[in-house]
Amino acid sequence: MDMQVARKKLGLKERYAVMTRGLDWTPSYQKMEDIYPYMSYEGIKIHDWDKWEDPFRLTMDAYWKYQAEKERKLYAIIDAFNQNNGHLNVTDARYINTVKLFISGISPLEYVAHRGFSHVGRAFPGAGPRVACLMQSLDEIRHAQTQVHSISNYNKYYNGMHDFHHAHDRVWFLSVPKSFFDDAITAGPFEFMVAIGFSFEYVLTNLLFVPFVSGAAYNGDMGTMTFGFSAQSDEARHMTLGLEVIKFILEQDPANVPIVQRWIDKWTWRGYRVLTLVAMMMDYMLPKRTMSWKEAWEVYFEENGGALFKDLARYGITMPKCAEQIALEKDHLSHQAWSTFYNYAAAANFHTWTPDEDEMAWLSSKYPNSFDKYYRPRMTYWREQAAKGNRFYNKTLPMLCQTCQIPMIFTEPGDPTKICYREVDYRGEKYHFCSDHCKKIFEDEPEKYVQAWLPVHQIYQGNCFPEGTDPTVEGFDPLAAVLKYYNLESGRDNLDFDISEDKKNFAEWRGQATRNI
Amino acid sequence: MAVAAVKDYDFPPADTMDKFHGAQLLYIGWEDHLLFCAPFAFPFPPSMRFGDIVGGVLPGAFGYHPDFAQIDWAKAEWFKSGKPFAPDFDKSLADNGLAHKDVIRFRTPGLTGIEGSCS
């Protein structure tokens, strides 16, 4: 019988080497390119995978331990929040619409990120990045789960969240975040890493998570705030992975530089277009504002991102060209986005409203060059009309951008009074774009984007009605049929906040909690 | 440039005209009226008379705006893909040279939205 002999414990560095790099081997009876078939077709050249440095040196056993500890804390707080009717402590019921936006627009992306990282982890021959991708893949599914668990408490009391994943795959505006991630996971492993690992996680993530998490904190939403904090240390690891991977690729071969630059240009723009939703959330949806979208862009992109691209200059990487256009749009983005959801409030899974006088004063002070001139008259008109019982519901479907799938709401760079139209003829078909950058992305890979599932076109093709619907019968109501297909209940999940069940219930329940009625 | 792929990559486009049950798509925008956040997408039969769109469809789409009732269609300026365009109201879309997924816009001189804000 073998005797168990106590061995000296390994040091951290040795442990890391044994438990990550030591798991790797060189195949003898299979070819490397058969085992790793996606390594060369994107044109990226890697000469030495061992040059990969993992700054965290995290092993799987340590990973489980840390994550389990975080889960215990998180669920204790979520339980307390739920048991104490924490949802009644948010600033006002309008806030809950940001939670709806998050669960249907962002949480499903966490799940797709999980799939994406497990795919690229399998695709990379290097043991270092493979282990790092495995951990990130697990982080992402944990984030999806904790978000679903935290937000499920709101779903017990408020409308629009009951079938968020079904909505994510169908509702017109959710095709924007969905198609963004679908574009990334259908790219090669190196492009995915630059798209999500670097451009999204490193360059843009602060613009997504900080606004939502600090928005939650400012508005009394302990549940959302807590999953945000629980994800934060993971995010730090993801950011490091994203930066490490890009430096590694760039250092491996000078021929990689132009390919990576094109991907950075593409994915910074793609990510920024998705952040349109965050911009309007910050400026219009949080009852207690944290900072304006414009301020957030200036801090997190122009200052922090500026420093990052200065750092990457030694590899030959430059600031994405789209940054110039984004700077021109920062005075307009959130107002144009909110106008869109105000227009199409009948077809969304959350409520919209017009800002009150105080909120308009805040918008004027944050956007002195644009709000009073271009957007205050619009918001004021809508508010007056709504007060007269003539609330605007736009029932005609909008034209969409073929690449980002956002309605063509964006104005010409430098002229906020003119919609920006761009078009391309490709193989006898016309394609339309919201911007030069979306047009360029299409022109680089037209074969991919001609397949886009554009919600408006799909509705007109008859693909967005419940099975068995006959659109030719007299009195057919296409909007009603589309809402059924979305599994949204008209009059309950959509329309203006003022007439919503959410508003009524929140006032009643808060009344019961704070007064003797 | 072409997409990078491990094998042949050729898929049919999602929005060819044959998929719209006899209709073609036409996009229509109203310049200087961003109360409507984006141009509209419509499915119309190619045989539809242009004037029937202006008289029968646009009021439902744009009629909410107080400027709409004041439009003098004789003075409206039209653009197709950004270039000046003179539609014949009595002719069909096809006879006006409008094909699937064409985009047209109209400008209504003197009407510039709520308080002149282009809203």
Image (spheres, coloured by chain):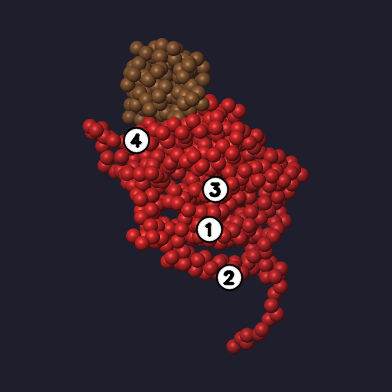
Distance from label 4 to label 2 (Cα)? Answer: 58 Å
The kind of residue tagged 3 is: Arg
Q: Which mark is residue A225?
A: 1
Local crowd size for mark 2, using a 10 Å CA cut-off: few (<14), some (14–19), many (≥20): few
Distance from label 3 to label 2 (Cα)? Answer: 37 Å
**Marks 3 and 4: CB-CB under 8 Å?**
no
**Which residue is drawn at the image coordinates 43% and 42% (left, top)?**
A352
Distance from label 1 to label 2 (Cα)? Answer: 22 Å
Where does residue A343 sit, x and y in percent of width and height? 42, 35
Residue A170, by quadrant, is top left
Q: Chain A rendered in what hue?
A: red
**Sooner in the amino-acid sequence: mark 1 or mark 2:** 2
Q: Chain of mark 1?
A: A
**Sooner in the amino-acid sequence: mark 3 or mark 4:** 3
Query: Closer to us: mark 3 or mark 1?
Result: 3
Q: Chain of mark 3?
A: A
Q: Are marks 3 and 4 on the same chain?
A: yes
One can see residue A4 in this view: yes
Query: Closer to us: mark 1 or mark 4?
Result: 4
Distance from label 1 to label 4 (Cα)? Answer: 37 Å
Q: Which mark is residue A289?
A: 3
**Marks 3 and 2: CB-CB under 8 Å?**
no
Q: Nearer the viewer, residue A432 or A332?
A: A332
**Which residue is drawn at the image coordinates 38% and 49% (left, top)?**
A503
Query: Tag 2's secondary structure?
Result: helix
Residue position for label 2: A65
The kind of residue tagged 1 is: Met
Query: Closer to us: mark 3 or mark 2?
Result: 3
Q: Quadrant of the N terminus of chain A?
A: bottom right
Q: Nearer the viewer, residue A339 or A5?
A: A339
Left or right: A500 in relation to A41: left
Judging from the image, what is the letter of the chain drawn in brown? B
